[in-house]
Amino acid sequence: MYEELALFELAIWLGLPAWVANATPVLGGGGRPIDGGRHLRDGRRLFGKGKTVRGFIVGLIFGTLTGLAQFYAAPYLRPLLVMFVTITPDMDYVLSMQIPVAVLMSFGALTGDLLGSFIKRRIGVESGNPSPVMDQLGFIIMALIFAAPIFEPSSVFVMILIVTTLFIHWVSNVLGYLIGLKKHPW
Ligand code: CTP
Ligand code: MG
């Protein structure tokens, strides 16, 4: 039981920089769009008005700061974990994630988000309209791919992280619907 809980906690630990990099542009974004308003030959924007330079920078900064905080918090978290579970090398690997990993994951998350918008525009989805799976998972998968040259967590954490990311999106959408921020619960 504690064992499973620890795996789950570490999967969240692994996802934090990418989640923060993905979420903070919503609050701190705006201003000049990354594509500068350019259209491609299909008549649609390169990325669209929802992808701004400031949003990208804000995401990169806050995702990195999250990794920095985690780096300094890890030595304090470790003894707490040890009280409940035996820390395996796989767990230690994720727990002692270094700051450059958080930078790559933040950069990857934001690039994945951009790539998602690029694809959405090409298939004719308007800025702000949903595109299932890509909206929810594009950023986290790209974050892991960007970090992969220096950081390869074991697949159990990756799988838990992906399922948890889907679940958090679903919960936040349902909550947004219940408190009246969203028109639909999806
Ligand atoms: N945002 C930003 N810069 C980014 C990413 C996001 O400023 N690089 C802000 C924008 O205000 C955007 C909001 O965060 O509208 C929500 O982000 P997201 O859902 O990723 O963008 P959408 O507006 O839905 O656009 P798209 O259809 O291209 O995903
Ligand atoms: Mg969106």
Image: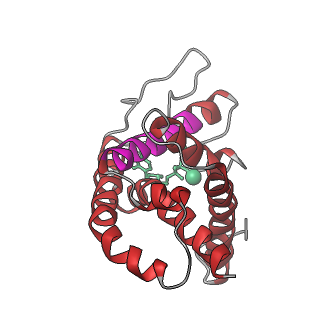
Looking at the picture, does residue 177 appear above or below residue 130?
A: below
Assign the magenta stretch its main secondary structure. Answer: helix
> Can the viewer see residue 93?
yes
Q: Residue at x 36, y 30 (%)?
A: 36
> Can the viewer see residue 129?
no
Front residue of this view, candidates 47 and 24: 24
Q: How many numbered circles does the render carry? A: 0
Looking at the picture, does residue 102 appear above or below residue 168?
A: above
Q: Which residues are magenta?
A: 100-117
Query: Is residue 5 left or right of 114 when viewed as pictured?
Result: right
> Residue 97 lies in what quarter of the image?
bottom left
Q: Where, quadrant-wise, is the C terminus in this rendering?
A: bottom right
Q: Position of residue 163 (x, y in %)?
A: 70, 60
Q: Residue at x 37, y 43 (%)?
A: 52
Q: Residue at x 62, y 68 (%)?
A: 168
Front residue of this view, candidates 183 and 52: 52
Query: Is residue 99 left or right of 161 when viewed as pictured?
Result: left
Q: Is residue 113 magenta?
A: yes
Q: Position of residue 151 (x, y in %)?
A: 46, 42
